[in-house]
Image (spheres, rainbow, N blue to C red):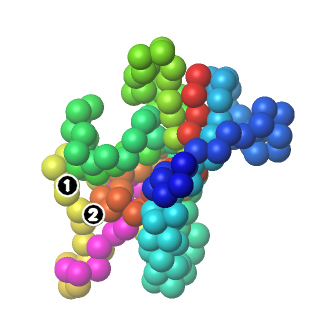
């Protein structure tokens, strides 16, 4: 459809991209359909932020993580928001799958997203932004928070352009 903001492109079963996504899922579930998500506006904004973080942090700021169904922060808190009021992403597809709900056709959806976690620290309930890195510079914030800063399994981002939904999977 001409002019659509978001487009989905099916990935052929058996293709290298399909196999790569299946590998990322690590046997959590077997997808019936995998689609590439294309949202040029979000992609451009994501890339601008990625460049900024790459300059500021001087390390790889991006991770591939899983999200249950959509990045709308309006729904933050429906499952506890233990680490802050942002969008939650998991290292494990199994974890995200536990929060996914079937649609009217009984299909489960899950996103494999590129997420700019940058410099992160441990989050806590009630946060609406990441905390400051030091008390001497209150404008220098962490880029995201996690459940555990030493060995994170969950990341929380507070800016909509910190995540790009690369693939949408259906079971």
**From which residue to which does the magenta span run?**
138-149
- In-image side of 70 versus 2 (left or right): left
Pointer 1 with pointer 2, Cβ within 8 A: yes
The mark found on residue 127 in the picture is 1
Residue drawn at (63%, 40%) of the image: 35
Position in image of residue 84 (x %, y %): 24, 49
Picture quadrant of residue 45: bottom left
Q: Is residue 32 above or below residue 158?
A: above
Residue drawn at (50%, 71%) of the image: 44
The kind of secondary structure element at disc 2 is: loop
For the C terminus, the quadrant is: top right
Packing grade of label 2 (10 A; few <14, some 14-19, many >=20) is many
Q: Is residue 112 above or below residue 103?
A: below
Q: Is residue 43 above or below residue 24?
A: below
Q: Is residue 64 visible?
A: yes
The mark found on residue 130 in the picture is 2
Between residues 124 and 67, which one lies in front from this camera angle? Answer: 67
Packing grade of label 1 (10 A; few <14, some 14-19, many >=20) is some
Inspect the magenta stretch and tell me whether residue 48 lies in it: no
Residue drawn at (31%, 46%) of the image: 72
Q: Is residue 66 above or below residue 44?
A: above
- In-image side of 157 versus 68 (left or right): left
Residue at the far left in the pictured view: 126
Between residues 154 and 65, which one lies in front from this camera angle? Answer: 65
Between residues 12 and 17, which one lies in front from this camera angle? Answer: 12
Per the model, the C-alpha gap separating discs 1 and 2 is 7 Å
Position in image of residue 40 (x %, y %): 52, 63
Q: Is residue 92 visible?
A: no
Position in image of residue 121 (x %, y %): 36, 60
The kind of secondary structure element at disc 1 is: loop
Residue drawn at (19%, 57%) of the image: 128
Position in image of residue 148 (x %, y %): 40, 49
């Amino acid at each position: 459809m001409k002019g659509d903001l978001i487009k989905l492109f099916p990935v052929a079963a058996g293709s290298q991209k399909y196999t790569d996504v299946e590998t990322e899922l690590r046997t959590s579930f077997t997808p019936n359909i995998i689609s590439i998500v294309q949202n040029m506006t979000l992609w451009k904004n994501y890339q601008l932020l990625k460049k900024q973080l790459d300059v500021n942090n001087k390390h790889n700021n991006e991770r591939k993580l899983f999200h249950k169904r959509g990045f709308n922060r309006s729904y933050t808190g429906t499952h506890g928001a233990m680490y802050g009021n942002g969008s939650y992403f998991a290292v494990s597809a199994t974890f995200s799958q536990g929060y996914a709900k079937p649609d009217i056709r009984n299909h489960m959806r899950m996103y494999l997203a590129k997420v700019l976690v940058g410099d992160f620290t441990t989050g806590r309930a009630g946060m609406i932004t990441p905390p400051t890195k030091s008390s001497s510079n209150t404008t220098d914030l962490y880029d995201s928070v996690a459940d555990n800063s030493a060995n994170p399994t969950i990341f929380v981002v507070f800016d909509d352009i910190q995540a790009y939904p690369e693939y949408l999977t259906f079971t």
